[in-house]
Image (spheres, rainbow, N blue to C red):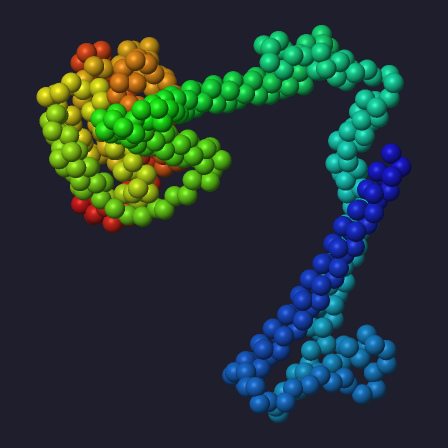
Amino acid sequence: MNKSRSMAGRLTASLQLERLFIWIFCDMLIFLFSVASWCVCAEMIHMGGVYPSVDRTFSCAEGLTGVWNKLGGAYYEFGQYSVPCGAFLHGLLTAIGIVGMVQTLIWTFSFVPVYFKIKKNFDPLNEIAVTTNLIASAKYKGFDDIETAIDKLDPMSDIHISTGNRDLKNLENSINMLLDRMRDSYASQARFVSDASHELRTPIAVIKGYADMLARWGKSDESVLDEGITAIQNESENMNKLIEQLLFIARSDNGRQPMTISEFSLSDLISEICSQAAMIDKDHEYVCDIKDSIDINADVSMIKETIRILSDNAKKYTPSGNKITLRAMMNEENEPCFEVSDTGIGIDSEDVPHIFDRFFRSDPARTRETGGTGLGLSIAKLIVERHGGYFKVVSYKDIGTRITVCLPRSALADEKEKKDENS
């Protein structure tokens, strides 16, 4: 406590000295400004203006004794004129003297309130010191209780810390919330590793099986050789695609996935992907619905990948001959959006909230038949979230699915916004 008072005293003295120096400096500036103003006014009255080439000086009448008397007999000489300035200097110094006395009184009597104000600001530090000493002393064993509870806790169980000590309730809640987040993260990571291992195990098993078959009798049977080579190539390509998707997700989770923002036409991109899909996929009818000419600032490769993921999903789950529609439009909030809708098998209502989960499959058998990895929509979600956008999903079983991606208004190109404002 004594050190706190000493610190408060030193801070008070420092602040008061700083205030004193500021007041003295201000008083000097006021004095110099007042004298200069009086001199300018005297020259304006007698000479009609201020001339830099004129000699200027201050002098005192002869025969006067004492500094104050000599100051009263002072003259301001400029050019051919000599103007008495003693009365002005007497009045100015008297006024500054009175102000200085008032400042001195204020400065002197403000020591005490400033000291107690600073001392009051140190009270929280004193309380922290007292509390710390209390915790460290043998009189307070609360932290021993919580340490014992943590030691006995199973990190993988759903049990929470509870010591029964009301003083530690807030600390217990914070630790329990941290434990819940750690458990969720661990469970998500374990599930991801398990699913990734399962996905990689299948193509590896297929490749190994065909390699063993080729080693036994495929060398002499051309049909077996061709089948084995084709299967190995397909599974290698699927495994390579899966690994690339896993790497993309890992980089995105670590914030290392680079983005190259540039201005491009979302409408033209939708039209391009729609034309390419119609050319490659002859089993479905593709419709390109461009409602607005939209220019945006985004990563064109990532946005293109998102559109392709959505269109590929629509193709996988839409029967042959049915229609798939790609759209680009502005929504009611004037946000740039693109949309992929189909007339396929749809999604069960209870599965809709989980379609963006990694490796999620509403129908595992159907997913294997279509060759999906269960990561496409997860990657699309990462891309859209990196751009600050969001999804809207509407799906009905055996009717179809419509997935809309909306980007923030900040993604609109400046030129487009200016055109809209001018119109």
Instruction: Identify the residue at horizontal 57%, vertical 21% (top origin).
Output: 182
Q: Residue at x 25, y 46 (%)?
A: 264
**Residue 47 found in image quarter:** bottom right
* Residue 165 percent across, percent down from the top left: 73, 10
Q: Position of residue 137 (x, y in %)?
A: 86, 21
Q: Residue at x 16, y 37 (%)?
A: 276
For the view shown, which residue lies furthest in the front direction? 220
Q: Is residue 144 visible?
A: yes
Placement of 388 over or under 100, stated as above or below: above
**Relative side of 190 to 59, left or right:** left
348 above or below 293? above
Do we see residue 312 in this rendering? no
Q: Image quarter for residue 71? A: bottom right
Q: How many marks?
A: 0
Q: Nearer the viewer, residue 323 or 76?
A: 323
Task: Answer left or right for 17 relative to 41.
Answer: right
Expressed as whole percent of the image width and height from the top left, the position of residue 69 reads: 81, 77
Q: Viewed as shown, does residue 2 lie left or right of 398?
A: right
- Quadrant assignment, res 186: top right
